Amino acid sequence: MNPDQCPDLRVLSYGGGTQSAALALMSAAGLMPRLDAVVFADTEGELPETYAYAEYVQGHLDRAGIPFIRVSAGSLEAALLSPVRTTSNPTPPAHVLNPDGSAGKVLGYRCSYDFKRRVVTREVKRLANERGGRRGAWKRMLVEQWLGFSVDEIARCKETTECRCGHSRLRAQRGGGDGPGAVGGHRPGCDRCECAGFDPWQVNVWPLIKDFGLAFRRIDTIRWFADNGHPTPPRSACWFCPNSRNVRWASLKDQHPDLWDRACELDEHIRDGGAFNARGGAAFAGQMFLHSARIPLREADLRSNAERQIDAGQGTLFDEAALAVDCIGGTCFT
Ligand code: SF4
Ligand SMILES: [Zn+2]
Ligand SMILES: [Zn+2]
Protein backbone atom coordinates (compact mmCIF):
# COMPACT_ATOMS: atom_id res chain seq x y z
CA MET A 1 0.00 0.00 0.00
CA ASN A 2 1.02 3.60 -0.38
CA PRO A 3 3.01 4.37 2.80
CA ASP A 4 1.61 7.92 2.80
CA GLN A 5 -1.93 6.63 3.19
CA CYS A 6 -3.09 6.28 6.76
CA PRO A 7 -5.66 3.50 7.06
CA ASP A 8 -9.01 4.15 8.72
CA LEU A 9 -8.78 0.73 10.31
CA ARG A 10 -5.89 -1.65 10.84
CA VAL A 11 -6.78 -5.26 11.59
CA LEU A 12 -4.92 -8.53 11.89
CA SER A 13 -6.44 -11.74 10.63
CA TYR A 14 -5.32 -14.13 13.38
CA GLY A 15 -4.98 -17.71 12.23
CA GLY A 16 -3.79 -19.17 15.53
CA GLY A 17 -0.38 -20.03 14.11
CA THR A 18 3.16 -18.80 14.41
CA GLN A 19 3.22 -15.78 12.16
CA SER A 20 -0.03 -14.12 13.08
CA ALA A 21 0.69 -14.69 16.79
CA ALA A 22 4.02 -12.89 16.32
CA LEU A 23 2.29 -9.92 14.67
CA ALA A 24 -0.31 -9.68 17.43
CA LEU A 25 2.36 -9.77 20.14
CA MET A 26 4.61 -7.32 18.25
CA SER A 27 1.78 -4.81 17.93
CA ALA A 28 0.75 -5.28 21.58
CA ALA A 29 4.35 -4.60 22.62
CA GLY A 30 4.54 -1.43 20.51
CA LEU A 31 7.11 -2.95 18.13
CA MET A 32 4.73 -2.50 15.20
CA PRO A 33 1.99 0.02 14.46
CA ARG A 34 -0.98 -0.35 16.75
CA LEU A 35 -3.73 -2.66 15.55
CA ASP A 36 -7.35 -1.58 15.94
CA ALA A 37 -8.47 -5.19 16.28
CA VAL A 38 -7.32 -8.77 15.97
CA VAL A 39 -9.91 -11.05 14.38
CA PHE A 40 -9.70 -14.79 14.94
CA ALA A 41 -11.84 -16.93 12.63
CA ASP A 42 -12.41 -20.08 14.64
CA THR A 43 -13.33 -23.28 12.77
CA GLU A 44 -13.77 -24.90 16.20
CA GLY A 45 -11.40 -27.50 14.81
CA GLU A 46 -8.07 -26.20 16.09
CA LEU A 47 -5.98 -28.21 18.51
CA PRO A 48 -6.40 -27.45 22.24
CA GLU A 49 -2.87 -26.02 22.36
CA THR A 50 -3.78 -23.54 19.62
CA TYR A 51 -6.72 -22.31 21.70
CA ALA A 52 -4.49 -22.11 24.76
CA TYR A 53 -2.01 -19.99 22.82
CA ALA A 54 -4.83 -17.77 21.53
CA GLU A 55 -5.72 -17.07 25.16
CA TYR A 56 -2.10 -16.19 25.86
CA VAL A 57 -2.10 -13.75 22.92
CA GLN A 58 -5.42 -12.33 24.02
CA GLY A 59 -3.96 -11.62 27.45
CA HIS A 60 -1.23 -9.49 25.89
CA LEU A 61 -3.71 -7.74 23.60
CA ASP A 62 -6.08 -7.05 26.51
CA ARG A 63 -3.29 -5.39 28.47
CA ALA A 64 -2.47 -3.26 25.39
CA GLY A 65 -6.15 -2.35 24.93
CA ILE A 66 -6.40 -4.05 21.53
CA PRO A 67 -9.66 -6.00 21.05
CA PHE A 68 -9.34 -9.69 20.27
CA ILE A 69 -12.48 -10.75 18.47
CA ARG A 70 -13.36 -14.40 17.90
CA VAL A 71 -15.75 -15.03 15.03
CA SER A 72 -17.03 -18.37 13.84
CA ALA A 73 -19.28 -19.93 11.25
CA GLY A 74 -19.76 -22.81 13.70
CA SER A 75 -18.04 -26.15 13.91
CA LEU A 76 -16.44 -27.18 10.63
CA GLU A 77 -16.30 -30.77 11.86
CA ALA A 78 -20.06 -30.74 12.56
CA ALA A 79 -20.73 -29.24 9.13
CA LEU A 80 -18.70 -31.99 7.51
CA LEU A 81 -20.55 -34.66 9.45
CA SER A 82 -23.91 -33.29 8.35
CA PRO A 83 -25.81 -35.78 6.19
CA VAL A 84 -27.51 -32.94 4.31
CA ARG A 85 -26.15 -32.10 0.89
CA THR A 86 -26.36 -28.47 -0.10
CA THR A 87 -24.86 -26.38 -2.86
CA SER A 88 -22.40 -24.88 -0.41
CA ASN A 89 -20.85 -27.76 1.48
CA PRO A 90 -17.59 -26.66 3.08
CA THR A 91 -15.52 -29.20 1.18
CA PRO A 92 -11.95 -29.51 2.46
CA PRO A 93 -8.91 -30.41 0.34
CA ALA A 94 -9.54 -34.16 0.51
CA HIS A 95 -7.59 -36.78 -1.41
CA VAL A 96 -9.67 -38.55 -4.01
CA LEU A 97 -9.49 -42.03 -5.50
CA ASN A 98 -11.20 -41.70 -8.87
CA PRO A 99 -13.36 -44.51 -10.28
CA ASP A 100 -10.62 -45.30 -12.83
CA GLY A 101 -8.12 -45.78 -9.99
CA SER A 102 -6.28 -42.52 -10.57
CA ALA A 103 -5.43 -40.19 -7.70
CA GLY A 104 -7.07 -36.80 -7.39
CA LYS A 105 -7.36 -33.97 -4.93
CA VAL A 106 -10.17 -31.58 -4.14
CA LEU A 107 -8.94 -28.26 -5.46
CA GLY A 108 -10.65 -24.93 -5.01
CA TYR A 109 -11.76 -26.13 -1.60
CA ARG A 110 -14.23 -24.00 0.27
CA CYS A 111 -13.68 -24.74 3.94
CA SER A 112 -11.18 -21.99 4.60
CA TYR A 113 -13.23 -19.52 2.59
CA ASP A 114 -16.52 -20.34 4.32
CA PHE A 115 -15.14 -20.79 7.81
CA LYS A 116 -12.31 -18.29 7.81
CA ARG A 117 -11.98 -15.65 5.12
CA ARG A 118 -15.67 -14.93 4.77
CA VAL A 119 -16.28 -14.57 8.50
CA VAL A 120 -13.21 -12.38 8.92
CA THR A 121 -14.33 -10.10 6.06
CA ARG A 122 -17.82 -9.87 7.51
CA GLU A 123 -16.40 -8.85 10.88
CA VAL A 124 -13.98 -6.33 9.37
CA LYS A 125 -16.88 -4.70 7.52
CA ARG A 126 -18.85 -4.61 10.77
CA LEU A 127 -15.93 -2.92 12.53
CA ALA A 128 -15.59 -0.42 9.67
CA ASN A 129 -19.33 0.35 9.79
CA GLU A 130 -19.11 0.80 13.56
CA ARG A 131 -16.24 3.23 13.11
CA GLY A 132 -17.98 5.02 10.25
CA GLY A 133 -21.22 5.24 12.21
CA ARG A 134 -23.47 3.67 9.61
CA ARG A 135 -24.13 0.63 7.45
CA GLY A 136 -22.08 0.56 4.30
CA ALA A 137 -19.40 2.85 5.73
CA TRP A 138 -16.79 0.22 4.73
CA LYS A 139 -17.23 1.26 1.11
CA ARG A 140 -15.60 4.60 1.84
CA MET A 141 -12.87 3.37 4.14
CA LEU A 142 -9.35 2.19 3.70
CA VAL A 143 -8.81 -0.92 5.76
CA GLU A 144 -5.32 -2.33 6.23
CA GLN A 145 -5.51 -6.06 6.82
CA TRP A 146 -2.37 -7.70 8.17
CA LEU A 147 -1.65 -11.26 7.16
CA GLY A 148 0.96 -13.39 8.88
CA PHE A 149 2.95 -14.77 5.98
CA SER A 150 6.72 -15.04 6.11
CA VAL A 151 9.22 -14.67 3.28
CA ASP A 152 9.14 -18.42 2.54
CA GLU A 153 5.43 -18.09 1.73
CA ILE A 154 5.67 -15.09 -0.55
CA ALA A 155 4.06 -17.01 -3.41
CA ARG A 156 0.87 -17.25 -1.33
CA CYS A 157 0.52 -13.48 -0.98
CA LYS A 158 -2.48 -12.30 -2.93
CA GLU A 159 -3.96 -8.85 -3.19
CA THR A 160 -7.57 -8.35 -2.16
CA THR A 161 -10.14 -8.70 -4.90
CA GLU A 162 -13.22 -6.92 -3.56
CA CYS A 163 -13.90 -3.46 -4.93
CA ARG A 164 -15.69 -0.71 -3.02
CA CYS A 165 -18.69 -1.44 -5.23
CA GLY A 166 -18.93 -4.80 -3.49
CA HIS A 167 -18.08 -6.79 -6.61
CA SER A 168 -15.10 -9.01 -7.03
CA ARG A 169 -12.34 -8.20 -9.44
CA LEU A 170 -12.21 -11.87 -10.39
CA ARG A 171 -15.93 -12.04 -11.12
CA ALA A 172 -15.69 -9.00 -13.32
CA GLN A 173 -12.78 -10.60 -15.11
CA ARG A 174 -14.72 -13.79 -15.78
CA GLY A 175 -17.70 -11.83 -17.01
CA GLY A 176 -15.96 -9.24 -19.11
CA GLY A 177 -12.38 -10.38 -19.65
CA ASP A 178 -9.43 -8.02 -19.89
CA GLY A 179 -9.98 -5.31 -22.40
CA PRO A 180 -8.36 -1.99 -23.13
CA GLY A 181 -8.25 0.04 -19.94
CA ALA A 182 -8.94 -2.92 -17.67
CA VAL A 183 -7.61 -2.41 -14.17
CA GLY A 184 -6.39 -5.72 -12.84
CA GLY A 185 -9.30 -7.49 -14.49
CA HIS A 186 -11.98 -5.22 -13.00
CA ARG A 187 -12.90 -3.17 -16.03
CA PRO A 188 -13.62 0.50 -15.77
CA GLY A 189 -17.37 0.47 -15.69
CA CYS A 190 -17.87 -2.72 -13.65
CA ASP A 191 -20.36 -4.77 -15.63
CA ARG A 192 -22.61 -5.10 -12.60
CA CYS A 193 -22.75 -1.51 -11.33
CA GLU A 194 -21.74 2.08 -12.04
CA CYS A 195 -18.30 1.57 -10.54
CA ALA A 196 -15.55 3.42 -12.45
CA GLY A 197 -12.87 0.80 -11.90
CA PHE A 198 -11.28 -1.51 -9.38
CA ASP A 199 -10.73 0.33 -6.12
CA PRO A 200 -10.20 -2.03 -3.17
CA TRP A 201 -11.61 -1.00 0.20
CA GLN A 202 -9.19 -3.35 1.92
CA VAL A 203 -5.46 -3.59 1.36
CA ASN A 204 -3.50 -6.64 2.39
CA VAL A 205 -0.24 -6.06 4.22
CA TRP A 206 2.35 -8.73 5.10
CA PRO A 207 4.37 -7.07 7.87
CA LEU A 208 6.79 -9.98 8.30
CA ILE A 209 7.78 -9.74 4.63
CA LYS A 210 7.96 -6.05 3.83
CA ASP A 211 6.94 -2.53 4.89
CA PHE A 212 8.50 -2.84 8.35
CA GLY A 213 12.05 -3.88 7.47
CA LEU A 214 11.75 -7.42 8.83
CA ALA A 215 11.96 -9.87 5.88
CA PHE A 216 11.35 -12.71 8.37
CA ARG A 217 11.56 -16.33 7.33
CA ARG A 218 9.51 -18.78 9.34
CA ILE A 219 12.58 -19.70 11.37
CA ASP A 220 13.22 -16.02 12.18
CA THR A 221 9.66 -15.74 13.47
CA ILE A 222 10.11 -18.79 15.69
CA ARG A 223 13.36 -17.31 17.06
CA TRP A 224 11.57 -14.04 17.74
CA PHE A 225 9.33 -15.70 20.35
CA ALA A 226 12.27 -17.07 22.33
CA ASP A 227 14.20 -13.80 22.01
CA ASN A 228 11.21 -11.90 23.40
CA GLY A 229 10.32 -14.22 26.26
CA HIS A 230 7.25 -15.85 24.66
CA PRO A 231 6.54 -19.58 24.37
CA THR A 232 6.58 -20.83 20.77
CA PRO A 233 3.06 -21.21 19.37
CA PRO A 234 1.96 -24.49 17.84
CA ARG A 235 1.25 -24.76 14.12
CA SER A 236 -2.35 -23.96 13.32
CA ALA A 237 -4.72 -26.03 11.19
CA CYS A 238 -7.82 -28.08 11.79
CA TRP A 239 -6.85 -31.37 13.43
CA PHE A 240 -8.67 -33.22 10.62
CA CYS A 241 -7.20 -31.21 7.74
CA PRO A 242 -6.42 -33.43 4.72
CA ASN A 243 -3.36 -31.27 4.09
CA SER A 244 -1.81 -32.74 7.25
CA ARG A 245 1.39 -34.68 6.74
CA ASN A 246 2.34 -37.82 8.62
CA VAL A 247 4.21 -35.93 11.31
CA ARG A 248 1.01 -34.12 12.19
CA TRP A 249 -1.21 -37.21 12.04
CA ALA A 250 1.26 -39.12 14.23
CA SER A 251 1.32 -36.33 16.74
CA LEU A 252 -2.50 -36.17 16.79
CA LYS A 253 -2.69 -39.91 17.46
CA ASP A 254 -0.07 -39.68 20.18
CA GLN A 255 -1.06 -36.43 21.89
CA HIS A 256 -4.82 -36.33 21.31
CA PRO A 257 -6.17 -39.88 20.95
CA ASP A 258 -9.75 -38.61 21.35
CA LEU A 259 -9.36 -36.22 18.40
CA TRP A 260 -7.53 -38.92 16.43
CA ASP A 261 -10.58 -41.16 16.86
CA ARG A 262 -12.85 -38.38 15.70
CA ALA A 263 -10.61 -37.76 12.67
CA CYS A 264 -10.80 -41.48 11.81
CA GLU A 265 -14.58 -41.37 12.12
CA LEU A 266 -14.76 -38.31 9.90
CA ASP A 267 -12.49 -40.06 7.39
CA GLU A 268 -14.86 -43.05 7.31
CA HIS A 269 -17.87 -40.75 7.04
CA ILE A 270 -16.62 -38.94 3.96
CA ARG A 271 -15.64 -42.00 1.96
CA ASP A 272 -18.71 -42.38 -0.22
CA GLY A 273 -21.31 -40.05 1.13
CA GLY A 274 -22.22 -37.32 3.51
CA ALA A 275 -22.28 -33.63 2.91
CA PHE A 276 -18.52 -33.60 2.70
CA ASN A 277 -18.79 -35.51 -0.52
CA ALA A 278 -21.09 -33.06 -2.21
CA ARG A 279 -20.17 -30.27 -4.56
CA GLY A 280 -22.93 -28.14 -5.96
CA GLY A 281 -25.44 -30.57 -4.44
CA ALA A 282 -24.00 -33.56 -6.30
CA ALA A 283 -21.69 -36.23 -4.95
CA PHE A 284 -18.13 -36.60 -6.15
CA ALA A 285 -17.66 -39.65 -8.29
CA GLY A 286 -14.57 -40.86 -6.45
CA GLN A 287 -13.89 -41.95 -2.90
CA MET A 288 -12.50 -39.36 -0.54
CA PHE A 289 -9.82 -39.74 2.11
CA LEU A 290 -8.25 -37.53 4.75
CA HIS A 291 -4.85 -39.18 4.33
CA SER A 292 -2.74 -38.49 1.25
CA ALA A 293 -2.09 -42.23 0.73
CA ARG A 294 -5.80 -42.58 -0.07
CA ILE A 295 -6.26 -45.36 2.43
CA PRO A 296 -8.36 -45.28 5.61
CA LEU A 297 -6.71 -43.03 8.17
CA ARG A 298 -6.81 -45.78 10.80
CA GLU A 299 -4.68 -48.01 8.55
CA ALA A 300 -2.20 -45.39 7.38
CA ASP A 301 1.53 -45.78 8.01
CA LEU A 302 2.23 -42.59 9.93
CA ARG A 303 6.01 -42.75 9.85
CA SER A 304 7.64 -39.72 8.27
CA ASN A 305 9.77 -40.18 5.16
CA ALA A 306 12.82 -39.67 7.35
CA GLU A 307 11.68 -42.41 9.73
CA ARG A 308 10.99 -44.79 6.85
CA GLN A 309 14.44 -44.15 5.44
CA ILE A 310 16.03 -44.80 8.80
CA ASP A 311 13.97 -48.00 9.20
CA ALA A 312 15.15 -49.05 5.73
CA GLY A 313 18.75 -48.30 6.70
CA GLN A 314 18.99 -45.40 4.26
CA GLY A 315 19.59 -42.48 6.60
CA THR A 316 17.56 -39.31 6.18
CA LEU A 317 17.04 -37.08 3.20
CA PHE A 318 14.82 -34.42 4.65
CA ASP A 319 12.62 -33.69 7.61
CA GLU A 320 8.97 -34.02 6.71
CA ALA A 321 8.03 -31.68 9.55
CA ALA A 322 9.39 -28.87 7.43
CA LEU A 323 6.70 -29.60 4.86
CA ALA A 324 3.76 -29.69 7.25
CA VAL A 325 1.08 -27.28 6.18
CA ASP A 326 -0.29 -24.34 8.10
CA CYS A 327 -3.75 -22.94 7.61
CA ILE A 328 -3.00 -19.31 8.00
CA GLY A 329 -5.44 -16.56 8.73
CA GLY A 330 -8.19 -17.74 6.46
CA THR A 331 -5.98 -17.90 3.47
CA CYS A 332 -5.16 -21.61 3.44
CA PHE A 333 -7.22 -21.94 0.27
CA THR A 334 -4.76 -19.85 -1.76
S1 SF4 B 1 -7.00 -26.21 8.09
FE1 SF4 B 1 -7.64 -27.53 6.37
S2 SF4 B 1 -9.71 -28.23 6.92
FE2 SF4 B 1 -9.25 -26.44 8.22
S3 SF4 B 1 -10.08 -24.68 7.11
FE3 SF4 B 1 -7.90 -24.86 6.52
S4 SF4 B 1 -7.90 -26.15 4.63
FE4 SF4 B 1 -9.93 -26.39 5.65
ZN1 LIG C 1 -15.98 -1.78 -8.55
ZN1 LIG D 1 -19.21 -3.28 -9.38
Image (cartoon, rainbow, N blue to C red):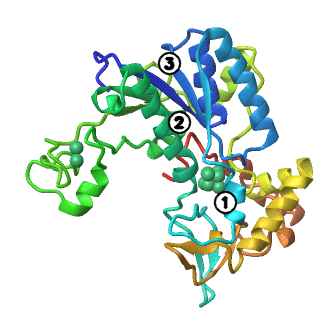
Side (left or right) of 100 relative to 187: right
Identify residue for label 1. Answer: 79
312 lies above or below 216: below
> Which quarter of the image is occupied by the N terminus?
top left
Side (left or right) of 278 relative to 262: left
8 lies above or below 260: above
Identify residue for label 2. Answer: 149
Disc ID at residue 36: 3
In the image, what residue type sits under mark 2? Phe
Side (left or right) of 69 relative to 290: left
202 lies above or below 23: below
Q: Quadrant of residue 306?
A: bottom right
**Can see residue 150?**
yes
For the residue pair 224 and 110, the one nearer the viewer reads as: 110
Counting from the top left corner in percent of width and height, residue 118 is at 49, 46
In the image, what residue type sits under mark 1? Ala
> CA separation, marks 2 and 3?
19 Å
> CA separation, marks 1 and 2?
28 Å
